[in-house]
Image: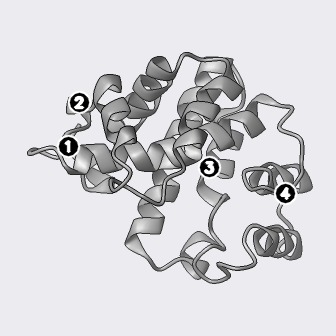
């Protein structure tokens, strides 16, 4: 479904990065890593094809394709859908969605495109620059850490470190 509905390399990179961050937090919580990974990978699969209907279109398509309802609902919960974020997986998808993209943007402006060069203080500084990655909602970056009950700097480090194993796939250096 991902490659059927998504052609944009940037959106594919985003979904892979969210998948990686979801895997990290699943291990941290001692929960099902594959389940978290699937939710991370699928959460935006419909965005390019149906931008004005997303994430409602994604829920509909997942149901039509026989994706288990609990996975479909967890994917759907990342948007402003009214579904409660009452489980670790739902909190995590919301918490890593925007931050993964912001961390990548911070790495892309480093001379060596290195994730290792991205530090929480630098992320905080870039957050103050409203022209930098302007589509990213700053309140969601800090709100995600609060939702998980993790200090913001630790959350940045967790997401950054989760991306290092897939750095070459997403056009970065570890």
- Which mark is nearer the camera, 1 or 2? 2
Q: Is mark 4 on a helix, strand or loop?
A: loop
Other-residue count near label 3 (Cα within 10 Å), few / some / many at <14 / 14–19 / ≥20: many
Mark 2 closeness class: few <14, some 14–19, many ≥20 residues within 10 Å: some
Image quadrant containing the N terminus: bottom right
Is 28 located above or below residue 122 in the figure? above
Near-viewer residue (124 or 115)? 124
The residue labelled by disc 1 is 173
Residue found at x 86% / y 32%: 86
Where disc 3 sits, the SS reads helix
Residue 85: x %, y % from top left: 83, 38
- Cα gap from disc 2 to disc 4, whole angstroms: 35 Å
Q: Nearer the viewer, mark 3 or mark 2?
A: 2
Q: Do the residues labelled 1 and 4 touch (CB within 8 Å)?
A: no
- Residue highlighted by disc 4: 81
Which of the numbered marks, if any, corresponds to residue 40? 3
Sequence order check: which comes first, mark 3 or mark 2? 3
**Labels 1 and 2 touching (C-beta < 8 A):** yes
Query: Earlier along the polypeptide chain: callout 3 or callout 1?
Result: 3
- Residue at position x 46%, y 65% from top? 12
């Amino acid at each position: 479904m991902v490659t059927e509905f998504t052609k944009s390399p940037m959106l594919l990179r985003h979904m892979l990065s969210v998948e990686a961050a979801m895997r990290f937090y699943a291990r941290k919580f001692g929960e099902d890593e594959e389940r978290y990974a699937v939710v991370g990978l699928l959460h935006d699969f419909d965005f390019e094809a149906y931008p004005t209907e997303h994430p409602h279109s994604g829920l509909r398509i997942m149901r039509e394709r026989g994706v288990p309802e609990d996975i479909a609902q967890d994917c759907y919960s990342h948007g402003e859908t009214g579904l409660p974020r009452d489980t670790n997986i739902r909190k995590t998808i919301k918490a890593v969605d925007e931050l993964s993209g912001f961390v990548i943007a911070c790495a892309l402006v480093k001379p060596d495109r290195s994730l290792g060069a991205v530090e929480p203080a630098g992320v905080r500084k870039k957050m103050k620059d409203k022209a930098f990655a302007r589509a990213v909602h700053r309140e969601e970056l800090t709100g995600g850490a609060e939702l998980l009950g993790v200090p913001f700097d630790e959350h940045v480090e967790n997401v950054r470190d989760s991306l290092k194993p897939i750095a070459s796939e997403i056009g970065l250096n570890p």
